Image (cartoon, helix red, strand yellow):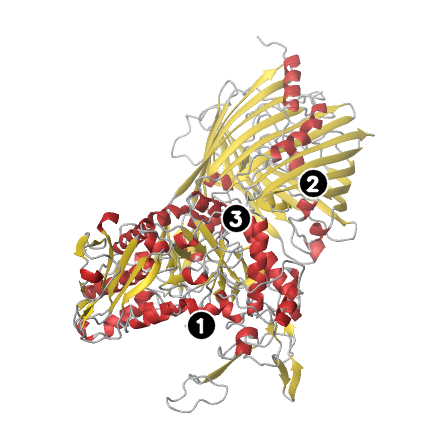
Amino acid sequence: MRRDLRPVLSLAVAFLGAAVSPAAAAQSPPAPPTTSQPTASTPPVTPEPTEAVPADSPTEVATEPEPAPDGPDEATPREAPPPAPVPEPAVKPDKKPAARGPHPHDPNSPPGLADGFHFGSYGRVIAGGDAAGRAGRNGDIVARGSRLDEANYAELELRREDYWKSTGAYTRIVATTAFANPIFHYNGQFAAALAIRNLYLEVRNAGLKGLSFWAGARMYRGDDIYLLDFWPLDNLNTVGGGVGYTFKTGTELKFHAGLNQPTDPYYRQTILRPPTYNQFGQAEVAILDRQKLVSSVKLSHVWPIGASGGVKGILYGELHYVPEGQREVENKVYEQVPKDKGFVGGAQISAFTGKRSTYVNLTARFASGLAAYGELNAPRQLRPDRLTTGAYEMLVTLSGNWERGPFGLLMGSYYRQFRNASRTLDWDDLNEGIVIVRPQVWFAKIAGVALEASYQAQQRGVATEAEPDLFKPVFAQMGRFGLIPFITPGGPGAFQRPHIRLIYLLTVRDAAARSFYPADDKFARRGVDHFIGVGAEWWFGSTSYFR
Amino acid sequence: MQFRLLAFAPALLAAAGCLHFDTLEEPVKVATHAKDWREAVIYQVLIDRFDDGDDGNNYLLDRENMARYHGGDWIGLENRLDYILELGVNTLWISPVIKNIETDANVDGYHGYWAVDLTQPNAHFGNLDDLRSLVQAAHERDMLVVIDIVANHMGQLFFYDMNLNGVPDILLQGTGTRPQGTPVPPGFDQSGFTHITEYDPDFNPGGVQAFTSLGPAGPAPIIFPFDPKSGHVTPMPAIFQNPDVYNRKGRTFNYDDPQQLLTGDFPGGLKDVNTTRCDVKQAFVDSYARWIELTDADGFRIDTVKHVEREFWRYFTQRVRQRLAARGKHKFFMFGEAFDGRDELVGSFTKNDLPSDEELARENSCDDGPELTGDQLDSAFYFPQHYQVFRDVFQDAASTDRIANLWANKTVNYGTVAPADSAGVAPHKVLVNFIDNHDVARFLYFARARVDADPAFAGKSLRDKELRLRAMLQNALLMLMTAEGIPCLYYGTELEYRGGNDPSNREDMWRPYPYLGDTAAPPAFDTTGPTFVFTKKLIEMRKKLAALRRGDTTVVWSTSRTGDESDAGIFAFERAGGEAGGNYALVVFNTNQHHDSRTAFDGTTMTTSAPAGAVLVDVLDGNKQYTVGAGGALDLTLPPVSGMLLVPQQDV
């Protein structure tokens, strides 16, 4: 029995909107690629044809698990060579994709599995600068601010997907290269800042329907706040492996563990020693060579409401651990470095109507100890015993989207506290938050105009003389207002891409915000700043922003 | 509907932004915490070497190099206040707090004496909150805090462009291997090389001059290098960006030349400031008084006072007292360091001799403040005693009459009238006594050399020698804690630290030596070591006996004899009278290092002011009793290198 809970859902959305609070952000992880809308859930693998859905149909709704294809072919002798992949059964190309329904380039849906090679991409390129012609740069004071002045970035994803008839399993090999600024046509340097951001193999329905495994290097994450380019609950860049199981109820349980070693003396120290047996030269020896274990567990479930809506709940946790080690402090003098650990606990509650990407997400996350510094960072400003105990990051976020007719409103917000492990308050100890809204209107099916406004504030742990003899932690505020006319060949929709757009961004920063920049920095001098640019943004067929 | 509510978001954010930071957001309430500075027992802390309480300010540390930052900070000291309290100390003297040149010639400004910005704290030590927290925590334990300051010079802010090429040139010339006994060529030092640096050229009374291959080229311009990484940044307050406020005459090499002494750069390229200028005087008063207003600290230890004109000290001390008194802080204590054994010179900064009317009128023209008087410092760092008593007598077993002679001149060489608005005690009664400090080798360093060279210890074990060293140190500590004035203990002395000259005498407190006679180091901040326990007991007795704090001093035995004579090495003095009421203490030393000595010689016995029949007990030796004879006579025999602290039986 399923009741029509749409009125309840509306109330829930309203409630979450009312509970908006200063939002929070993660502690400056490496700029990840952007993503599209927050998906309510990754749809289970289905070998069934992806049905075209009517316009305005939900793309976030978890579909029922499909019957598993035939199990492993028991007649296949064990000695037989591995079965060759065969075309995925029953996947029928959409002959007539609906106007807004999923099609191969639908930005609102994760790509389904289909035999063969596939290509996907995310990218943004921008040409712009300030009113004086100086190069543009990110002007936010909070860790996650407006993405309108973000630098160029692109991902190119190549996948190989196969259905293995003999076992009923599906495999997906994903290789994603990412390019960061600068690019050749800007600086004339024939070089690239290149990274491998995905390189993994995933096996689904691995002997048991709903059971999946993966191993390799992977961007491993959940829902994002598009306006802030921010995955608030779970966003791991990891090398390791994981296992997941989707219950018949749609409940999904995922566990993963990975290892990393950020480039930092906290993890690795090499020294020079003479080679053995009186050989010439020198040999590099790793004295300290410890890795960080990062593991996560995630439990999520979607409760359908009405024909297309639903509520999604997520519980999430992480464990971070580094073993003890030894470091050389001077020639042949060693010191022990202690083992350390950290934890993350978090939750998300989401409500979505299933129509035109309307949703609201509320997340809360608390990270302690080693985990407070993020998965790819080395902890700084430790306790005197060189432990991270006492460090924490507390994060609350609220984000959402609403569309009706030619209008839409996208918003994001967070409030964040970070304290490092050292007792004293210093620059890195902070409270910060942002509220950002982007109302937009589409017209002529192919164009639109968006306005963007954000208020961001940050309180740092350094004291400033508020008045004679009265010192307070510095409190900085900033307002940003943007005008973004755009062309959207894919039609209306907050998460419809690609876009070509013009950007005007006005920034107003108070004296405290200006004080965050060193002397002679333009941002230290300007209370008002202008950014003008033209750029493009796209995403299609990529897995990275749906996992 | 829900989106209309977003309008409240900024307000919520602002409210959230005001979430509590655990910081001192209230103005400091400046108050008078000192009661009587004669009650003080000072503990000198080199902040960088005491304890690392905050990893957050650990920047470019090199703990294996004594000339670099090691990571100690104000939080580290605060964390260890209970250790210091356990010792009994009630006053902290901490390193200069202001921002320093980061590093120069591969030496860091870890000590704090290389100022570049008088308005900012030294970030290696913490931030203003940390400093305020330290002072507050000290006050909560009834401890006072004295901040070290420098007014003679700034750090290595500029170089003299002597060859006009715009870059700082440093030249080492010569072989360094001049044959012994050959004459020293002009311009060369004993090792046979000449060292020319545009950061630190020798003194020239006409100012450092430029030259080219064709000859003199006039006054050398000065250039302020700008290198944020090494801390060569814009000096503050802004007046110190003006080349005219510096004397620019080069490095002092002859300390007996008054002109060099007062206007020469301090060795190491520390730029001498023209402290006769009114704007300089005012800048130093404003800068340093501000640190007291920001922290509520209780006093200044002032560096290199002999390199600064007395007119500056008159202005500085009086204006600081007046300004702080107006804020509610009285009995602010300022003692100056003149690194010099000349008693008259050291004492001259505590006297209130008036200059000529003409001179005074000139000095008064600086501002509209109250008329300046002859008042100067409250006290002086008693360097003459360091040399003549702790070095000569307690290390080298010189005759004890030099102690008596030195002390006899206190009222001659030092001020006898407390300055107005000052600590309220005549300077000669509150001289700051010390055994050693951060500028001289630790007592045990040279004492060891003495013992090693003593034929009596030839063939003796290392342990025997070290036990003798401990006896020498503890005898010196007995003198330190019982002599009139304010005892000042250099950190680590209580743990038998023994480093040589700077920087070897600036060891880390978290890496203690083995105790003398032992081979394994104790835990850091151990409170069970023999000298810690001994020092603690001395401080307890000082607190218990008013005579040791406020009593007058009467030397009852001293001797010029250092040989086999019966009283060789004996020194004894009474502390009684004055403001000590009826309290009485008798301190007796045998500083002779080879034989027992008596308080008697050639038929004469020491006489004291104690009444005949009075029973005195030695609180350092199990309360062993001694009865005073007729006429106050007291014939005591002490083993070599030992001391007694005798007090009336009823006071124990």
Disc 2 residue type (three-letter): Met
Q: Nearer the viewer, mark 1 or mark 3?
A: 1
| Residue A115 visible here | yes
Tell me where residue B220 appears, x and y as whole percent.
Answer: 64, 78
Q: Is residue A546 above or below residue A267?
A: above
In the depicted view, which residue is nearer to us: B34 or A483?
A: B34
- Residue at 64% over, 27% down: A20
- Label 2: chain? A
Give how far apart the Cα atoms at labels 1 and 3 are. 33 Å
Give how far apart the Cα atoms at labels 2 and 3 are. 35 Å
Classify residue B537 as left or right of residue B163: left
Q: Which residue is mark 3?
A: B296
Tell me where residue A142 appears, x and y as whole percent.
Answer: 63, 41
Q: Is residue A531 above or below residue B98?
A: above
Q: Which residue is mark 2?
A: A478
Other-residue count near label 3 (Cα within 10 Å), few / some / many at <14 / 14–19 / ≥20: many
- Label 1: chain? B
In the depicted view, which residue is nearer to us: A18 or A291?
A: A18
Reading the chain from its start, which is encountered first: label 1 or label 3?
3
Disc 3 residue type (three-letter): Asp
Disc 1 residue type (three-letter): Glu
Task: Say which element carries label 2.
Answer: strand
Quarter holding the C terminus of chain A is: top right
Q: Is residue B291 above or below residue A250?
A: below
Callout 2 touching callout 1 (CB < 8 Å): no
Tell me where residue B401 appears, x and y as whole percent.
Answer: 30, 72
Other-residue count near label 1 (Cα within 10 Å), few / some / many at <14 / 14–19 / ≥20: some
Task: Say which element carries label 1.
Answer: helix
Q: Which residue is mark 1?
A: B344
Task: Say which element carries label 3.
Answer: loop
